[in-house]
Amino acid sequence: MNKYVRYTYILLIIILIGSVKSSDKQPSLVSDDSTDDSDDNNFDTVVRELESLIEDHQAPGDTVVSDNLLQHGLGHITSHGYMEQPSDDHTPPEHQRPDESPTTQDQPTPQDGKYYLIEPDPGKDGKYRLVPITHLEYIPAHPEPQPEDTEPVEKPESESESPEEEDNFEVIVRGVENIVDEEHKSPPAIEYKKVDWSPDVQTGTQKPNELPAIMFIGLNNDDELVPMTTSCYKIISFNFYLVKFKFGCRCVEILCNGKRVWSHRPGTSYPRTLIYNRKEGKFMVNFNNRIVSCSLKDGRWTEKVIYRPKELRLFTKTAEGLYCKLTHNKYNFHLTAFGSFKYVFNQGLTCDMIQINDEIVWQREESGPIIHKMSYFGPKYLRIYFEKFTMEIQNFEGEYKIKTFLNDK
């Protein structure tokens, strides 16, 4: 029964197509007789083709053409197959929002419409459906717009470049540079003055101005660092080998040619005198009980501390006939270029007895000559200088022997 119903629908459609075509023809070009004959011929041909088609295909799935025609109509026939018939109630794409106006979407045309394929298996009602072609087989003429609510892709934090981070990086680098500079920063620059050599100092074969620029830094009454002037020190001796300075205030720093030679350490005593060895280029900073020898090695000044010999004791005789030990403020003590300790006694003071360890090695007689200075080389040898002669005291096999030499005139 269904077969005949379908057959009836197909005949009606063919009749309608024929009537449309006949209405489109111009009367002036085609006569009535020819029109009727061609319509009859076309009608008989289509009917015979449909009858043969229905009779030859009776199995399920053989009514694909008739089913699709009944459901969708013929549509626009092209060389590529069926295309969707344009309609006024065009459904917006899935990505289009419902609130958007359909007029903003371009209406499809037969040339850019959506293509369909026939399902391989029938549905529950035994009919086949048309399905849209996937994007792999059909590429739209216009790319689908991105939904408005889609947020732009952001770079991960590790890849993003933030101007604030760059600014902070520069600030941090500048801060680190400032810290490094402060750690290696030298003490506040002070305008040092070159040593003002006294004009009455006896000079050797080399002029004082040929010496390096020696500068002293001291503390004033307000404990402020100030350059020391000639009112704070004086030159007490100068010759070809040595230049000796005596300080009258607290010296805390010694510089030579702009480099720090020695600096005072808190809690320690201040130097009394300074000797510069012109031959070896050494400084000897003299204290009450020690000497700090400063030498230049590989462009840096190094210090070596030498303590005053404890085994050597010097005495003076009082008016009552008692021997009193001389303290460090009764003489000047320094290290010579020959490695000996030199003692120069204050004017008006006499050294009346010399003791090494527990043995008295020399004792001044009544009305005897006065010692001007003394050089101590060690427990086994010392030299005493008088006005007219020089005395050597040397230990041979545990016994001290004395030799005397006249001084050169």
Image (cartoon, rainbow, N blue to C red):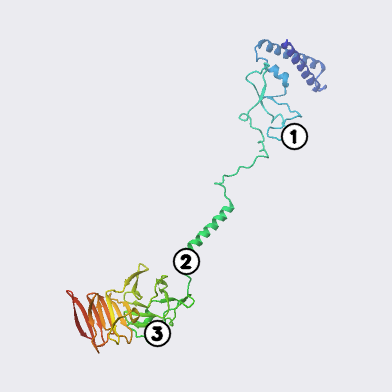
Furthest residue toward left: 397
- Residue visible at 24% across and 85% down in the picture: 364
Residue 309: x and y, percent?
29, 74
Residue 153: x and y, percent?
61, 42
Mark found first going from the N terminus, 1 or 2:
1
Q: Which mark is residue 163?
A: none
Q: Residues within 10 Å of mark 1 (few under 14, many from 20)?
A: some
Mark found first going from the N terminus, 3 or 2:
2
Q: Amino acid at mark 1?
A: Pro
- Residue visible at 57% across and 53% down in the picture: 165
Q: Amino acid at mark 2?
A: Lys
Badge 2 is on which residue?
A: 185
Q: Which mark is residue 102?
A: 1
Whether residue 80 is visible, yes or no, is no
Q: Residues within 10 Å of mark 3 (few under 14, many from 20)?
A: few
Vertical arrangement, residue 186 with respect to residue 35, above or below: below
Q: Which mark is residue 198?
A: 3
Q: Amino acid at mark 3?
A: Ser
- Residue visible at 75% across and 36% down in the picture: 101
